[in-house]
Image (spheres, grey):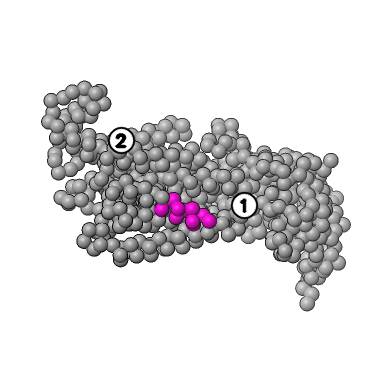
Amino acid sequence: MSLLEIIEASFAYEKTGNNVFQEMSTSIEPGEICCFMGPNGCGKTTLLDCILGVHKLRKGRILFNGKDISSFRPGEIARHIAYVPQSHERTFPYRVIDIVKMGRAAYTGRFSSPSAQDKAIAQQALELVGLSHLKHRPYTQLSGGEGQLVMIARALAQKTPVIVMDEPTAHLDFKHEMVVLETIVRLVKNSGITVIMATHFPNHAFYFENNELNIRVALMHNKKILALGSPSDVIREENMKLIYNVNTKMVSCPLDNESELRQLIPVGTII
Amino acid sequence: MDTTRKKIIYTVLIIFPLLFMFASLFVGRYPLSLSAVTEVLWTRFSMGTTDLPDMYQTIVWDIRLPRAILGAMVGGCLAISGAAFQGLFRNPLVSSGILGVSSGAGFGAALAIILFSASTSAIYLSAFAFGTVAVFLSYMIGKVYNATPTITLVLGGVIVSSVFSALISFAKYVADPYEQLPTIVFWLMGSLTSARYQDIMVAGIPMAIGVLGLIGIRWRINVLSMGNKEAHALGINLKIDKGIVIICATLATAGAVCVSGVIGWVGLVIPHIARMIVGNDNKVLIPASFSIGACFLILVDDLGRIITGSEMPLGILTALVGGPFFVWLLKKTKGGGW
């Protein structure tokens, strides 16, 4: 049985409005990275929201381990699926460790606060992303990349088999984009976490493939999934032309360990 | 290390308001010695007898002590609800009156003063009722979608506040200018003068429920301050938890405002003073706000008694005393991470 199954899912924000996506079906297996890829406004984020139970589908079902997501209570979803936001708006200067501890909310009673065990789990999560030296710093003083790693640590503290990431590298600089991607690779390889990710960078998918992760890409086009498969099979010049209106060239060069490094280079937009 | 520090913080938070309350028993136009005050307290607590003059007992037990208790409760309630609302609305500029409770209560009091010629219990009741109605209206206005997004809730509060402010002006306009108008104006400036045990018992019920609720749910306010979507993904039932915070903060504020009148400043700035001292984690911030708010209002009330022979309204002094203190603290702590 698949870990997560999306069956004929349709969604619209208003009752009479147009569907954001419709009759979409796919399934996600344990231990893989599933990238939903498509241009801005294609419904990636909305789909992730539906998986998280923020929105309810208009039609269709989303099953987690065979159980309908819409029958989960909020605390229950949070014990199965964690979330890393695209950009987190920082308001109050909480300490980094306090932010990560919030990942334990689903395991903490309404009128209590995290236990010593929860604190240890938060500490561990922070070590996994390599930021334990910053734990007492106000998180408002962190750089964008460090902030995103803190968000990943908070998701790890939820101890869920699945983490949903909404464009986790948006707004990051050249290096920190890499740091976040490397962290994701490490987590999937070492902790066996399943990652569902929205992205619009084809090369992120290639990066995961080059690192020999179990990755599938779902290209979203016209409110549906246009193609589903490994990056090399799906991210093709003609598909990019179709969904982004961009002419691209695929390049590949051999790496020392006999594998191949693939990248997609944008050439120009099509008017 | 961390746990001993916590113990110290919590001990200080409990002891300081008690110290301030005790100190305020000495402040006033009639000077009392330490032995006289302690003797009165001792005889009252041990149900014994004393040969001190009755007047001493009246001053300490019937005038200054209820006033100190009420001051602590009102200051604490305003500050704690301010801190809770700031977290809930993810906005440090929000105060305890953001959902219209103060202006609603103000109108309620003005209405009672005009209709029932200043019967105290009518004023309390009316102020409390209109204060809670104002919050309810803000909530209903904010509920344009099913999810009560934060911004529409704040907007609802602003609209309701301005409507009730207009109604207060109207009440002033039609009030009798020799009897009722001064009463309304003084009520709106806030005072603890009328403090009696009876008031404390009645208004204390909503205040206690509100404060205990907020202290109970305080860690969840951290999670709520992450925003709706993240709080949901972290496993929070938004409707219930937001509802608890709003109801508790409203009970606390309405309970405070209905006995003391409108006291500004405390519900906005005391939480910030607490942030600078103990940090932003609501687990400590919420009780610290209560404690500091309690100390602050007792202090301001004492100053009002010392500076002028007659009673200076509290609403004037809170900002005059608190403003410079805030600036000093801002320099000293460098804002505590802001």
Residue B28 visible in the picture: yes
Could you tell me how far apart the alpha carbons at marks 1 and 2 are, in whole angstroms? Answer: 41 Å
- Return the residue nearer the eye: A263 or B177: B177
Count of numbered badges drawn on the protein: 2
Residue type marked 1:
Lys
Q: Chain of mark 2?
A: B
Residue at (29%, 37%) from the top-left corner? Answer: B197
**Which residue corresponds to mark 2?**
B18
| Residue in front for this viewpoint, A54 or B168 | B168
Residue B75 located left or right of residue A144: left
Q: Which residues are magenta?
A: B130-140
The answer to whether residue A185 is visible is: no
The amino acid sitting under disc 2 is Leu
Please state which of residues B267 and B259 is positioned toward the viewer in this rendering: B259
For disc 1, the chain is: B
How far across and how far down the image is residue A40, in percent? Answer: 71, 64
Mark 1 neighbour density, 10 Å: few (under 14) some (14–19) many (20 or more) = some
Q: Is residue B136 magenta?
A: yes
Q: Residue at x 61, y 50 (%)?
A: B230
- Say if A2 sits above or below B153 in the image: above
**Residue at label 1?**
B229
